[in-house]
Amino acid sequence: MNKTLKPLFACLFSGLICTGAAAAEPQVINIKTDGSSMVMSVTSDGEVLFHHFGGRIDDAAPVTGIKSYRRTDHGTDNLAYSTMGGRNFREPALRVTHADGDMNTELRYVSHTTRTLADTNVTRTVIKLTDTNQALDVELFYTAYAEENVITTHAVIRNREKGSIVLHSFYSSSLPVKARSYLLTHLYGAWARESQVDHTLLTHGSKSIESRKQVRTTHTENPAFMITLDSESFDENYGEVIAGALAWSGNFRLNFEVDEFNVLNILAGANPYASDYTLGAGESFTTPEMIYTYSSEGAGGASRHLHDWARNYGVYHGHEVVPTLLNSWEGAYFKFDAKVLKQMIDDAASMGLEMFVLDDGWFGNKYPRNNSNAGLGDWQVNAAKLPEGIDHIASYAHSKGLKFGIWIEPEMVNPKSELAEKHPDWIVRPPKREAPTTRNQWLLDLTNPKVQDFVFGVFDNTMKLSDKIDYIKWDANRNANNVGSAYLPADEQSRFWIDYAQGFYKVMERIRAKYPDVLIQACASGGGRVEYGALKYFDEVWTSDNTEALSRARIQYGTSLFYPAVVMGSHVSATPNHQTGNITPIKFRFDMACAGRLGMELQPRQMTDEERQFARRAIASYKEYRDIVMQGDLYRIGTPYDKSGCYGLMYVSKDRKQAVLFTYSLRYQGRSLIPKFRLQGLDPKTGYTIRELNVDKSRNWFDGKTFSGEMLSNAGINPSMPKIYDSGVFLLTAE
């Protein structure tokens, strides 16, 4: 041990040393919410050990004395923040090459503080650690949200050495878990089939969930997971579950390592892939926020905790009224003029929608944006399509009682654009190599402050086109590949992955400082930025470019495991569907979309009179219950993966006086038993009247009748849904 540190540790731990033969009592750190505890302790030699994340324990001292009675050959299986060095053989949370070339780090306790923030629901604990031989400090931040039963964590790494150090791994958290078995639930997918659910029983060894794509980081994997403890089956309502979600808009990595003693160590944070990060003397690095919750009520309980936290703390405008909208994309694509847009606005108003959004194709003059090949980056209003400008269209929408929104893609540029001609140095490409295109476009280098200024300017100048712009649809239709930056020095190119995401956040901070009230959607090809790092600045995500209702059953189900309905853009589109070619009834399409943020994505002039009439009815009824969907507690009934082909979900208001139930038949039922839906979340002693919405006559024996919450929960109801694409929406009102 460094001589200078020996007096420090002697001082720090003098109060922990007992006289005689008695052992020292460890110092206990107990981070609590209303229903959970995260317990750590400080040993006599300064190691911070992790003991418990689960149900709340007020007197946590005995927890630190629990013995496994299994000898380890390293003794560090429960370090609160693992490092490369000492006796740790597992993948570390922190791996550093120090200024003198030393590759080892051993952290020891210095102090910790806990304080209640201005929001008395929130407490923050900071644990300060330092290396035994190097001038390297680490602060572990734990923020506890009492009512939501969520604890977030991140680390700050500070370099006090005389020279630069290199961070090779820099995870936000290291969480040791001890159970008999671990069932991992996570989301995977691809464009148009995002948020598919995978259940994997973890065995000895490591499994990683990660993204190396940058920008659209969540198409193929999502930085969120659930671990079901002591069970090999996933259950919505029962069992112990730990859930986590990383708030980071860059490459991420979640690593699950089960060691030879059956201890699961979870590492979560920014992906260290190709991301060595140099810290100069006196500099610090802050890792992304990792969000954790514990539930003793299965996956459903974990989801509700995350949803509550998201609406209260994690999502911009998490409690705002959500406007219904018509988006122009699938109705007009690039082929429109002012007349077409005004007709769509008229039709949107006639159906009771509340906003019109002008999508791609409104800009570019030298290189007009008439397809995806040109114009991106040149954000002048296209004079041929819209000679009277954007304000003319926005004002027309407002005159019809609608809000107005507009599409931008400020991080991207077409090779065929004035911007690419003027600033080739702004394009992400390695020296002496070609920059491959995706969707005929390149990526702008957000590590460069001048590019950050430009991207902010795109947003700012777009808002200046009219004082009647209420909504921005922010798209991002490619990933980062063949990476290189003309801005970053040659020996710091590995900073690109981190600095791009941080540059994106710098832009969003400026935008929200100037435009706190505008609604902003994170589109990213649909499903590409579904994570809490972006949602700190965005009101909603475009859940998927696949608007087909049958596909959306699984996409929205998977998304709902970690993200609330208030962020899920969900639109009714034309049939046959433009992505899948599938033909589905108008009611099924609306009933699926109404379980999220309702919008429409079609040309209303191509709807039949019957469809337009139903749309008016469904939109009106959605306004009646949307606050329950946006702000209520979600209870999933079955899954869209069930062999029965039946699936349901319900939202219950916080006061349990109202609820809305959605039921879907995803395949032909034939002569099979009518499925039973046991309703959840209701007050057992309260009577609820059930009313089916958007039907001309009663279809079910329980429609219009009143039942106790106890009966609805224990006996249930069985909506009649014999055919594929049958669906129902039922409003429950307490009597």
Image: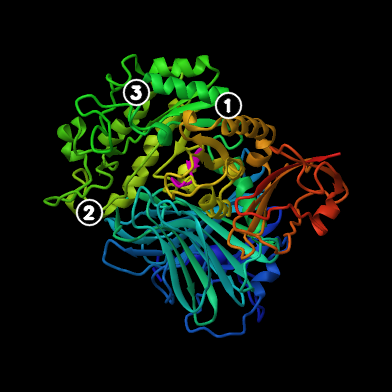
* Part of the protein shown in magenta: 540-546
Where residue 394 sits in the image (x, y, percent)? 44, 19
Does residue 652 lie above or below 252 as drawn?
above
Of the numbered discs 3 and 2, the one sitting upstream in the chain is 3
Q: Nearer the viewer, residue 649 or 29?
A: 649
Residue 619 sits inside the magenta stretch: no
In-front residue for pair 513/475: 475
Q: Earlier in the sequence, mark 1 or mark 2?
A: 1
| Quarter containing the C terminus | top right
Label 3 secondary element = helix
Q: Which mark is residue 351?
A: 1
| Label annotation for residue 461 | 3
Identify the element where label 2 is drawn. Answer: loop
Determine the image quadrant of residue 350. Answer: top right
Q: Earlier in the sequence, mark 3 or mark 1?
A: 1
Q: How far across and how far down the image is residue 21, in percent?
A: 65, 81
**Between marks 3 and 2, how big is the CA–CA gap?**
31 Å
In depth, the one of 431 and 176 nearer the eye is 431
Q: Name the residue type under label 1.
A: Met
- Residue topped by disc 2: 482
Circle 1 or circle 2, nearest the eye: 1
The secondary element bearing badge 1 is classed as loop
Colouring style: rainbow
Q: Is residue 31 visible to us here?
A: no
